[in-house]
Image: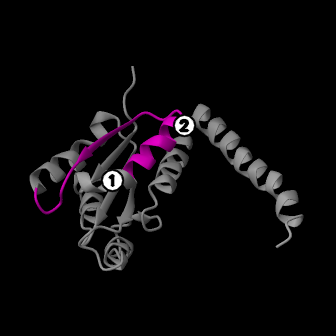
Amino acid sequence: MNVPRVSIIMGSASDLSVMEKTGEVLKELGVQWEMTVVSAHRTPERMVEHAVNAASRGIQVIVAGAGGAAHLPGMTASLTHLPVIGVPIHSSNSIDGWDSVLSILQMPAGVPVATVALDGGRNAGILAAQIVATSDEQVAQRLIAFKEELKEKVMNSIEQVENHRA
């Protein structure tokens, strides 16, 4: 049975281009996931229901992307014991993305949200997989291989860069 272990939520469909990168990397790493829209401001009851019931559905990590005031990650974290990864999104109503970054980053004591870079959906997926890997050896092995591929890409680029002449 393919029960999702990571829930990817976003404040609106306009966040999809960033958040789909989270799903792409989870797919690469063999981690089951789900994705939906949950607005902290426009559908607060849906947000509460989603956060409160996530663990009982088998979810281990929630990745929440939001732009502008970006309350979704923090409010979600306030409602669950699960780790929440916040993805600040540079949206059309954002102040160069800084409002989103600071809204997610500056959480009060007792309500932590792991925060990735602005529009950092891919890193959020990797971090979610790393959390899942603490209790899943197969995911851990795929992450080890993934990190080795990153190393190989850098090693393969060294000669090209060192021999480049402007």
Q: Nearer the viewer, residue 151 or 56?
A: 151
Residue at left offset 89%, top offset 64%: 163
17 w.r.t. 66: above or below: above
Q: Residues within 10 Å of mark 1 (few under 14, many from 20)?
A: some
Horizontal side, residue 164 vs residue 51: left or right: right
Can you give x and y, in whole percent of width and height, for residue 64 in the image? Answer: 33, 56
Can you give x and y, in whole percent of width and height, for residue 4 in the image? Answer: 37, 33
Q: Which of 79 and 9 is in front in this view?
A: 9
Q: Residue furthest front?
A: 166
Q: What element carries label 1?
A: loop
Horizontal side, residue 129 vs residue 108: left or right: right
Can you give x and y, in whole percent of width and height, for residue 91 in the image? Answer: 29, 67
Which residue does the numbered mark 1 point to in the structure image? Answer: 81
Quarter placement of the N terminus: top left
Where does the magenta region start and end? Answer: 19-42
- In the rendered image, is residue 142 in sight? yes
**Residue type, numbered disc 1:** His
Q: What element carries label 2?
A: helix
